[in-house]
Amino acid sequence: ISSGLAIRSSQAQNCSGTSQRKAWRDMTCSEQDDYLQAVIDLKVSGKYDDFVRAHAHNAGNAHGSPEFLPWHRWFLYKFEEALQEVSSCDIFIPYWTWERDSENESQP
């Protein structure tokens, strides 16, 4: 699948190693604030909109095809890299634990 991406990687930071993801509810308040600020900073930079356009452009090809999982894995990897470029190497994309959170909607 063609990426259709205008996503540029300036490699401003050299983040090496692997990210250790956490569930949103397991993140500290500081980690949550840092993540949200990184997303805001990415939006202000204009790169967030590049990701929105790239996803919209490829949704028809990636969704419902064998490339679905690898393409989204790559896409999230590039999104996390972009977050790290506007923030720090400590930023990671959190996940939502549906099995824990679906039963108690009042929990943060």
Image: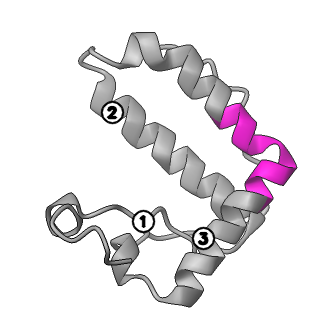
Q: Which residue is mark 3?
A: 35
Q: Quadrant of the C terminus?
A: bottom left
Residue found at the very far top of the displayed protein: 60
Q: Residues within 10 Å of mark 3 (few under 14, many from 20)?
A: many
Question: How far across and how far down the image is residue 19, in percent?
Answer: 43, 69
Residue type marked 1: Pro
Circle 2 or circle 3, nearest the eye: 3
Q: Per the image, is 49 magenta?
A: yes
Residue drawn at (55%, 27%) of the image = 55
Q: Which residue is mark 1?
A: 94
- What's under tag 2, amino acid-wise? Pro
Residue 108 visible: yes
Identify the element where label 3 is drawn: helix
The crowding category of the residue bearing disc 1, from other C-alpha atoms within 10 Å (few below 14, some 14 to 19, many at least 20), is some
User: Whole-Å distance between the Cαs marked 1 and 3?
Assistant: 9 Å
Q: Which mark is residue 107?
A: none
Secondary element at tag 1: loop
Earlier sequence position, callout 1 versus callout 3: 3
Which residue occupies 76% across, 42% down?
47
Predominant secondary structure, magenta span: helix
The reply to whether callout 2 and callout 3 are in contact (CB within 8 Å) is no
Residue 43 % position (x, y)? 77, 50
Hey, what amino acid is under mark 3? Tyr
Give the residues in magenta. 41-51
